[in-house]
Image (cartoon, helix red, strand yellow):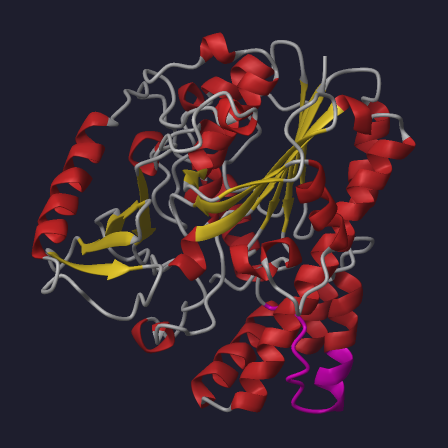
């Protein structure tokens, strides 16, 4: 019985990795995963923010089915939505190492380790503890999320703070309270990044992007440490590893900072810079195709169905309990290359917490380059060609495609509804205060 390790690197853009064509950022460990496995070059997140995206990733459900459609909501993930994890738990230990306790109490996990920064030593010890027992491990790595080290220090003390933060984010120690008390913490650093972007100063913006690239390189080292840990324990040859991200990151390519000056990095927009994420599936325990790249779009809701299939549990997959589908037959080349994996990828954005409505914008993305982004509040939409320029609304030139995608968007939502029993609970005050504090520490509030 094999192990599965699902690594989600928060805020990792698909185009940030060397294996995806980025020559400025060395990522040798992740590149090796791609070389040994299958790289999906167009994986689409169903929500460009952490809570909704990870809920979809772990359930295989669209946000309108699992119900966690806002970043700051007090609801818990319904237990009945965790169909894939429940099937895995039948013969695997469930381990989670997260950067935010967004789902409330653990749902049957044998280890639920919540820290502001996931720590490699904690993960190594858990692997050692369960080395003789099959396990599924969910690893949420946070340190690519803002604020990454940018060298935007205002003075010597701020420069020293950045150096302290480098130590904080190396995943061996965690000093968020000391950093916040002495140097202003993450919120102050995030504001410096936003100020640099607003300035339109190429030098300052260059420092922001350089800081992001350094954070990606650190994440690659973290992935390498996980691989080394598994190999040292004799577990790598028994393990399938899936590497992905909850969402990408904006560098104001579409003038997002003027639309959302306080939260432009991600969460509110549905451009590819925030909804297109990396996805690499590498099964060291089998003869899955190695060094393969699939250009057709897939979705992060396809991850858990694929894991079930890898573990020989495909019989538990049904449109009645998951929206995603297994990608294993495409990895194994059991289908024609021309067959469409996912004709439409759905995504949605959240609202500010003061709004009562759940959703601000929704989008539907096709394989042939078109994306409809619909504003639910204004009841209007735009059509873009994501292969060319998402800045230009082309619905006037392509009215037939615009109407067709509007119809297909409505049809997708209607036909993809899955009944999740009404067991969604609200957090008590102590639980919510704990999460609100963590969100504040991480710069969200």
Image location of residue 129, percent across then percent down = 84, 24
Helix, strand or loop: magenta stretch: loop
Q: Nearer the viewer, residue 177 or 282?
A: 282
Q: Nearer the viewer, residue 253 or 107?
A: 253
Is residue 159 shown in magenta? yes
Magenta extent: 147-161
Residue at coordinates 47% horizontally, 8% vertically from top-left?
A: 315
331 to 320, vertically: above or below: below
Residue at coordinates 47% horizontally, 62% vertically from top-left?
A: 445
Image location of residue 162, percent across then percent down = 73, 76
Identify the image quadrant of residue 390.
Answer: bottom left
> In the shown orientation, is residue 442 left or right of residue 72?
right
Is residue 393 shown in magenta? no
Image location of residue 102, percent across then percent down = 51, 42
70 to 164, vertically: above or below: above
> In the shown orientation, is residue 374 left or right of residue 218?
left
């Amino acid at each position: 019985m094999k192990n599965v390790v699902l690594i989600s690197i928060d805020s990792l853009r698909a185009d940030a990795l060397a294996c995806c064509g980025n020559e400025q950022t060395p990522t040798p460990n992740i590149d090796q995963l791609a070389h040994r496995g299958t790289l999906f070059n167009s994986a689409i997140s169903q929500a460009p923010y952490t809570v909704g995206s990870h809920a979809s990733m772990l359930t295989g459900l669209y946000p309108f089915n699992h119900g966690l459609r806002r970043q700051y909501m007090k609801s818990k993930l319904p237990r009945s939505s965790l169909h894939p994890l429940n099937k895995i738990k039948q013969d695997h230990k469930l381990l989670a190492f997260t950067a935010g306790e967004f789902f409330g109490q653990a749902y049957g996990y044998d280890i639920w380790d919540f820290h502001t920064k996931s720590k490699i030593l904690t993960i190594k010890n858990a692997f050692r503890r369960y080395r003789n027992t099959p396990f599924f491990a969910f690893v949420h790595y946070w340190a690519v999320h803002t604020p990454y080290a940018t060298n935007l220090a205002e003075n010597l003390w701020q420069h020293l703070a950045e150096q302290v933060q480098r130590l904080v984010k190396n995943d061996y120690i965690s000093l968020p309270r000391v950093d916040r008390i002495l140097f202003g913490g993450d919120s102050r650093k995030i504001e410096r990044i936003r100020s640099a972007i607003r300035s339109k100063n190429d030098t300052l913006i260059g420092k922001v992007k350089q800081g992001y690239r350094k954070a990606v390189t650190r994440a690659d080292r973290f992935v390498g440490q996980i691989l080394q840990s598994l190999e040292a324990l004799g577990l790598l040859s028994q393990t399938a590893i899936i590497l992905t991200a909850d969402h990408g990151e904006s560098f104001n390519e579409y003038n997002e900072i003027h639309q959302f000056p306080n939260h432009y990095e991600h969460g509110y927009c549905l451009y590819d810079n925030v909804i297109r994420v990396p996805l690499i599936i590498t099964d060291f325990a089998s003869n899955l195709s190695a060094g393969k790249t699939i250009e057709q779009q897939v979705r992060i809701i396809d991850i858990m169905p694929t894991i079930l299939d890898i573990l020989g549990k495909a019989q538990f997959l049904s449109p009645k309990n998951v929206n995603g589908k297994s990608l294993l037959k495409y990895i194994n080349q059991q289908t024609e290359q021309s067959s469409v994996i996912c004709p439409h990828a759905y995504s949605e954005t959240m609202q500010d917490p003061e709004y009562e409505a759940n959703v601000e914008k929704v989008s539907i993305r096709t394989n042939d380059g078109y994306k409809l982004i619909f504003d639910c509040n204004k009841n209007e939409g735009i059509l873009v060609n994501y292969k060319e320029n998402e800045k230009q609304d082309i619905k006037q030139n392509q009215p037939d495609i615009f109407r067709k995608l509007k119809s297909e968007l409505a049809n997708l939502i209607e036909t993809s509804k899955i009944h999740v029993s009404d067991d969604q609970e609200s957090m008590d005050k102590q639980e919510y205060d704990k999460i609100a504090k963590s969100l504040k520490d991480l710069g969200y509030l």
